[in-house]
Amino acid sequence: MSDFGDFEGLEGLVDRDFELSVEEVETTELSEYSGPCGSCANCATGSQPVGAVLENKEANLDIAEVEFKAHRTAYYKNESETPLRVGSRVIVEAERGIDIGRVLAVGERVREKRRCRGLVGQPMRKILRIANEKEIEQSEENRRTEDSAAHVFIEKCAKHNLSMKLAAVEYQFDHARLTFFFTAETRVDFRALVRDLASVYRTRIELRQIGARDEAKKVGAVGVCGREVCCTSWMSQIKHVNLDHARFQSLSLNPSRLAGACGRLKCCLLFEMGRYLDSMKDYPALNSKVVTERGEASIEKLDVFNERVYLKYPNASVAEAVSLDEIKKYQNPPAKERLHN
């Protein structure tokens, strides 16, 4: 039987490196919960960014966040002190040669991002200059080359019988590197494909296998809410989601309801997690027992928003809703003693 018990299909929604079985989820206590990084629940659910306690030692540096094709971003030093504006096209140092990108953020906002991500002190490349009109035209020509390279990539994959799904293509500004981002169910031996592509474009070929969440961020999509998915529109850092995010919010473990556009657990399961973790400290644990005037009942469901607790009595067919204040009265030890006596 699958680790996910009777909930067939859930195994496809969870990030494989951080998956939890239904059995593990049901036995996890709030006080014991820790995220993929092993830290507290607040950090893992996004209510407190990783590295928030770090001192910012880059306060005096002029730093900019630059975005490239396929929503790839990086941080650069502006040592020339050229005034930069959000949206400006700039020429930057690349791993080999130079590249062109768009300024996404400048100033204190960028320093705060690096501080929150624990990147303070890590090396950065330089912004060389503001791009001129000729360089911008060259960049647009590269975009057209990327479109044709995508078709060539698909043809070559079919030729080599490789099961690879292309997500994006990025051609470095100076033609020093051509990068293909793809997804695949398993690891792929693409050495022959790289040699074939290099013979066509006469440049360095790089293939990067990415996950389903990264693919959605690069390609873009519309969520069930009717808006552009968060990972494309505003989330600069994709966090991992697992089944205890759904369990703590008393959500039904229904794959069709929990899956996002990427086919994994929805990132929006994270957004209200902080409130649930704080609010549920006042609630009794699920499946625990409480004694009322009618006898002993088990806690079947918690409604945090309406401050209600659903009690299931042994001989009742449906659960009964009780206010949180009333449950607190029943949890008072002296009151329990009077009922037992």
Image (spheres, grey):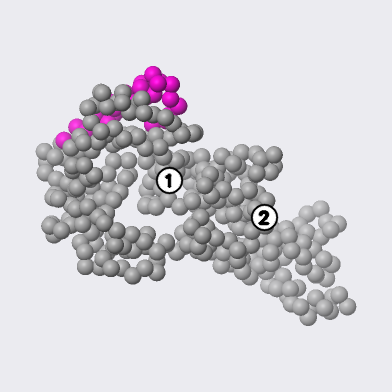
State the CA–CA distance, disc 1 to disc 2. 30 Å
The amino acid sitting under disc 1 is: Val
- Give the structural element (helix, strand or loop) at label 1: loop
Q: Position of residue 36 (x, y in %)?
A: 51, 55
Q: Are marks 1 and 2 in contact (CB under 8 Å)?
A: no
Q: Residue 336 or 73: which is nearer the viewer?
A: 73
> Which of the marked residues, 1 or 2, is nearer the chain's N terminus?
2
**Side (left or right) of 317 relative to 198:** right
Q: Main secondary structure of the magenta part?
A: helix
Residue at image location 21% in from the left, 36% down from the top: 176
Q: Is residue 49 magenta?
A: no
What residue is shown at x 77% (from left), y 65% (from top)? 289
Would residue 139 be visible to someone looking at this image?
no
Q: What is the three-letter code of the residue carrying label 2?
A: Glu
Pointer 1 residue: 229
Residue 235 is situated, as x and y percent measured from the top left of the image, at 39, 52
Image quarter where the C terminus lies is bottom right
Magenta stretch? 138-166
Q: Residue 26: which numbered mark, if any?
A: 2
Whole-percent x, y for residue 172 in the image: 23, 38
Compared across the picture, whether 172 is left or right of 18 comes to left
**Residue nearest the observer in this picture, 235 or 325:** 235
| Quarter where residue 6 is shown | top right
Picture quarter containing residue 146? top left
Q: Which residue is pictured at 77% across the width and 68% down the height? A: 290
Question: Please, is residue 161 above or below residue 112 in the view?
Answer: above
Give the vertical position of 256 relative to 242 (above or below).
above
Q: Residues within 10 Å of mark 2 (few under 14, many from 20)?
A: some
Up-down relation of residue 60 to residue 151 (above or below): below
